[in-house]
Structures are given as structure tokens and as C-alpha cells.
């Protein structure tokens, strides 16, 4: 039977080991080199075995209470620690979609993602990738096995939703919020005023309000949110006097608005529907994310420059460095009153209908 290349390598290694044992200092160096080469050969063998059949080694990625506890600690101890909301969402999606018996093959990964609605698959993607990183970095699972599971994750990118609600639909939603007599109307109007991301507005202003950050500028108010992430930001929230007064009244009465409260209210209060031109159905009153899109477009139509509107919307304008944000704020101070006047007109028209 012909000798295989691996057999020849093993024979050579044995010969070198024999020489090492019969020599002095040079033998120690040869022995160290032989040990390193042996470890590398074992690693290659392990990869071949796993590539041939992941189940051969009995590897299994499971989601259990014990793993969940360590997983949470893992997310909190990363170089960029995950926030509580993100951790909660990751655990929720793994609770919902991880197979009870765990995952051993790429096919099971694919099947799990196919069972998840396409619209929320991106959340499972983040949660499961973090779980695989945990198994590899903390529990020491082989890179090849983890890579095979990771490669089976289907694409989760969805087409960006570029639809912006028309003005009549915003007015209709405004009327619904008024009739509901809910404190969440103040939050809805704050998003309309500022164009800020609802999540940032809720967390930094409504949940953690600090009076010293609110500035009365006469024709408008400014609240310094101070959120700066890698891609999503919220520097300032500009508010009309009407909304600022409503908010301060809530605050003085001790009423608080939280992000979870906002989401739950809109889930429970569906007062109508609207079919978009693309055939998709949206519920009324409009969700804050759509109100934010409307706010950006209306700012642009009512005298707010593109870079300023983007900055207020929480996006970095192209070609504008952070050291020039003070200039954007000065421009916003000049231009925002035109948008505020438009909002005042909408609200006065609503009041006149009563």
C-alpha cells in the first residue's frame, strides 16, 4: 500500500524527535519545533473532521437558562457594551426562534431563519451572530464549526421603506391623537416638531429629562439630547412653544412617558388603516417613525436647508465635519421658525374645527 504524504510527514517528525532526544541544546529547539508542527497538524485534522461532518464531534449550539445568563454577561462586557434594550431584544428573539434541541448543522440554521418573519429577521440575525461569537470566544467552540453555522445565515437586508405620509394623513392622525386624550400625544407632537428619532427622544428627553438642558429661545425651544453613535445620532431636539408647554405640564404633574409605553400604546390603539400606493397597509394614527419622515420633508419645504434638516433628523450631512456642527446649530436657529410657523398653522386649523 503506497505511503500517504501525511504518513511521510509523521515519519519525518519521529526521526527528528529521536535526534532531539539524543542531542543537547539543539535537541530542545528541535523538540519545540516538532511540538508546534504537531499541534498544527492536529488542528488541520480537526478542521477536516468538522468540515466532513459537524455532528461527528457532538457539537451543539443550545439556548438554555444557563447559557442565557452567560450570554447577557458576554454582551455587557464587550468593548462596546450592549445596552439593556438591545440585550432584551436579543434574548427575546432567541427565546422565540432557537430550536429546543439546539443547532448542530447549517441546515438547522437556515430553517430557523425561514421560520422567522422576514420583516424582523434582522433582529434574529444580530442575536444569533452574537450567540455564535459567545460560543466561539467564551466556550471555545472550533472556528470552523462556528463559521459553517454563520455562513448558513440567509441575507436579511430588506428594501428601505422610503414612503412618507402625505399631509392630509398627518392631519387625520393629529385629530385622532387629540380625540384620544392621551399623554402620548405630547410625544407624537415632539417627534413632529423635532424630526428626531423616536427612540432617542424617548430615552434622552422623556425618560431622563433634565430641566437645565431645555433652552427657551423665544420662538422655539431647544433640548440638548447629546446622543452620538457610529451611525445614529441626536444632537438637539427643536420644539415649538406649544409642544414644550405641553411637555412641561406633564413633567410638573409627575407623569412620565417611556419608550416601551409609547410602543405599547400604539400597538393597542389602532383607530383606522390606510393603504399606501405600494399596497402596504399602515395603521392610524401614524406611528412616530412615519411622523419623523414627514417632519424632515416639511422642514425642507419650509425653508430649512438640506444639511440642517439632516442634522436635526439625526444624520451626518455629507462633507460636514463635527467641528462645524456649531454652525449648523446657528443656521437651525435662523431657519427652524419657518417650519414652526407651518406647524402652528396646522394646529390652529385643527383647533378651529372643534
Image (cartoon, grey):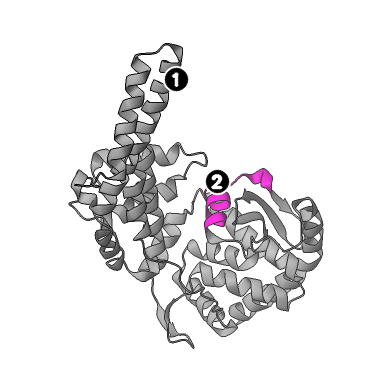
* Secondary structure of residue under mark 2: loop
* Secondary structure of residue under mark 1: helix
Residue 132 in percent (x, y) is at 35, 48
Work out whether residue 345 can be spotted.
yes
- Disc 1 marks which residue? 29
Residue 152 in percent (x, y) is at 34, 61
Residue appearing at x 60%, y 52% in the figure: 230
In this picture, is 328 found above or below 343?
above
In this picture, is 317 found above or below 176?
above
Confirm or deny contact between disc 2 and disc 1 (CB under 8 A).
Answer: no
Counting other residues with Cα less than 10 Å from the Cα at mark 2, is it few (<14), some (14-19), or many (20 or more)?
Answer: some
Q: Which residues are magenta?
A: 199-213
Q: Nearer the viewer, residue 95 or 202?
A: 95
Residue 306 in percent (x, y) is at 74, 70
Residue appearing at x 82%, y 65% in the figure: 334
Residue appearing at x 52%, y 49% in the figure: 207
2 vs 1, front mark: 1
Amino acid at each position: 500500500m503506497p505511503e500517504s504524504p501525511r504518513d511521510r510527514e509523521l515519519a519525518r517528525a519521529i526521526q527528528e524527535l529521536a535526534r532531539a532526544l539524543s542531542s543537547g541544546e539543539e535537541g530542545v529547539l528541535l523538540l519545540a519545533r516538532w511540538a508546534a508542527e504537531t499541534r498544527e497538524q492536529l488542528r488541520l485534522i480537526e478542521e477536516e473532521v468538522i468540515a466532513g461532518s459537524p455532528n461527528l464531534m457532538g457539537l451543539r449550539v443550545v439556548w438554555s437558562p444557563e447559557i442565557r445568563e452567560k450570554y447577557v454577561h458576554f454582551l455587557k462586557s464587550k468593548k462596546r457594551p450592549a445596552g439593556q434594550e438591545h440585550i432584551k431584544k436579543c434574548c427575546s428573539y432567541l427565546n422565540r426562534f432557537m430550536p429546543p434541541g439546539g443547532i448542530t448543522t447549517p441546515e438547522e440554521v437556515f430553517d430557523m431563519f425561514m421560520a422567522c418573519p422576514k420583516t424582523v429577521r434582522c433582529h434574529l440575525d444580530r442575536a444569533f451572530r452574537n450567540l455564535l461569537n459567545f460560543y466561539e470566544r467564551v466556550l471555545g467552540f472550533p472556528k470552523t464549526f462556528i463559521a459553517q453555522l454563520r455562513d448558513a445565515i440567509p441575507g436579511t437586508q430588506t428594501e428601505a421603506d422610503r414612503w412618507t405620509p402625505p399631509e392630509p394623513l398627518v392631519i387625520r392622525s393629529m385629530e385622532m391623537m387629540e380625540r384620544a386624550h392621551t399623554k402620548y400625544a405630547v410625544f407624537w407632537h415632539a417627534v413632529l416638531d423635532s424630526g428626531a428619532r423616536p427612540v432617542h427622544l424617548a430615552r434622552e428627553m422623556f425618560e431622563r429629562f433634565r430641566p437645565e438642558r431645555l433652552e427657551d429661545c423665544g420662538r422655539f425651544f431647544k433640548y440638548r439630547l447629546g446622543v452620538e453613535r457610529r451611525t445614529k445620532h441626536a444632537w438637539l431636539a427643536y420644539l415649538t412653544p406649544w409642544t414644550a408647554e405641553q411637555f412641561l405640564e406633564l413633567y410638573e404633574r409627575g407623569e412620565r412617558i417611556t419608550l416601551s409605553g409609547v410602543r405599547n400604546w400604539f400597538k393597542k390603539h389602532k383607530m383606522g388603516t390606510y393603504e399606501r400606493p405600494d399596497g402596504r397597509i399602515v395603521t392610524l394614527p401614524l406611528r412616530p417613525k412615519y411622523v419623523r419622515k414627514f417632519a424632515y420633508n416639511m422642514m425642507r419645504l419650509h425653508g430649512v436647508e438640506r444639511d440642517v434638516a439632516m442634522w436635526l433628523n439625526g444624520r451626518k450631512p455629507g462633507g460636514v465635519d463635527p467641528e462645524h456642527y456649531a454652525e449648523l446649530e446657528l443656521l437651525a436657529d435662523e431657519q427652524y421658525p419657518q417650519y414652526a410657523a407651518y406647524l402652528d398653522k396646522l394646529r390652529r386649523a385643527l383647533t378651529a374645527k372643534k
